[in-house]
Amino acid sequence: MPARRLGMFLVICAPSGAGKSTLIKKLCAEFPAISFSVSATTRAPRQGERPGIDYHFLSREEFLAWREAGKLAEWAEVHGNFYGTPIAPVKDALAAGRDILFDIDVQGADQLRDSLGRDGAYIYILPPSRAELYRRLSGRGTDSPEVVAKRLAAAQGELAQAPLFDYWVENAELDAAYGDLKAIYLAERRRPGRHPDFLGELLAQWEAAV
Ligand code: 5GP
């Protein structure tokens, strides 16, 4: 479509171990027009994570200062650390007609429904079963059995929130799940409301051609 398109936002949530990060990386790699919203967090960087690219790594005091200054569109405590979405890059991306993707938890999604509204696409990635989620979480080999048990219990609580989302993607097999996610993104981009000038330009062309 030739005319200007408005930027849109995608909110992607999933229980830990559902494969969310892999799906998000694939989508951002295929569609460079999507900006990834870099969250602030108080958790320590993991091996290979880059400050300012994967997360803004803050002390608890810095995080609270950002929160008090109104710099966060939403924030939540997840697995004992604070996480939050800086608001300025979101405003910049949407104003410039770029899409922006949020990798956040269900508490954050809830707050964004209030602050940004429902005009984005709220997508929930579902693990195919409890047994498979357990297999994936314990197969990582990075977490103790207690941490795995905590994440499974948290997943069960989170799944109760899944009906609040616009779309579900079941990640039983990566390529199929990615196909679904891409289809949702492409369909969302085609909504008439995201192309305010398109019909006017098309009709003007028709009139000019008569
Ligand atoms: P991790 O520490 O494994 O990178 O992320 C843990 C959880 O925190 C994930 O579910 C992730 O989506 C969530 N998370 C990351 N950034 C944010 C954020 O800015 N806000 C909220 N509410 N959750 C976040």
Image (cartoon, grey):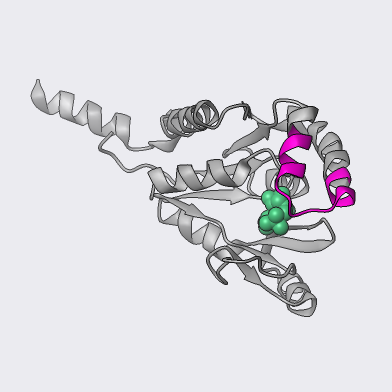
37 within the magenta span = no
Is 171 placed left or right of 96 in the picture?
A: right
Task: Count every numbered label the image shows and give the total.
Answer: 0
Is 178 placed left or right of 140 in the picture?
A: left
Residue 15 visible = no
State which quadrant residue 72 falls in.
Answer: bottom right
**Extreme-top residue of the structure:** 210
- Which of the image's four quarters has the C terminus? top left
Residue 105 visible = yes
**Extreme-left residue of the structure:** 209
Main secondary structure found in the magenta portion: helix
**Residue 44 screen position, x and y as percent:** 72, 70
140 within the magenta span = yes
Is 46 placed left or right of 79 in the picture?
A: left
State which quadrant residue 166 falls in.
Answer: top right
Residue 193, placed above or below residue 35: above
Q: Which residues are magenta?
A: 133-149
**Residue 17 screen position, x and y as percent:** 70, 42
Residue 114, placed above or below residue 85: above
Residue 116, placed above or below residue 73: above
Query: Which residue: 16% across, 29% down?
Result: 205
**Residue 203 screen position, x and y as percent:** 23, 26
Residue 126, placed above or below residue 47: above
- Which of the image's four quarters has the N terminus? top left
Query: Which residue: 87% across, 48% down?
Result: 145
Query: Which residue: 33% across, 37% down?
Result: 197
- Ligand 1's quadrant: bottom right
Query: Which residue: 74% across, 54% down?
Result: 142
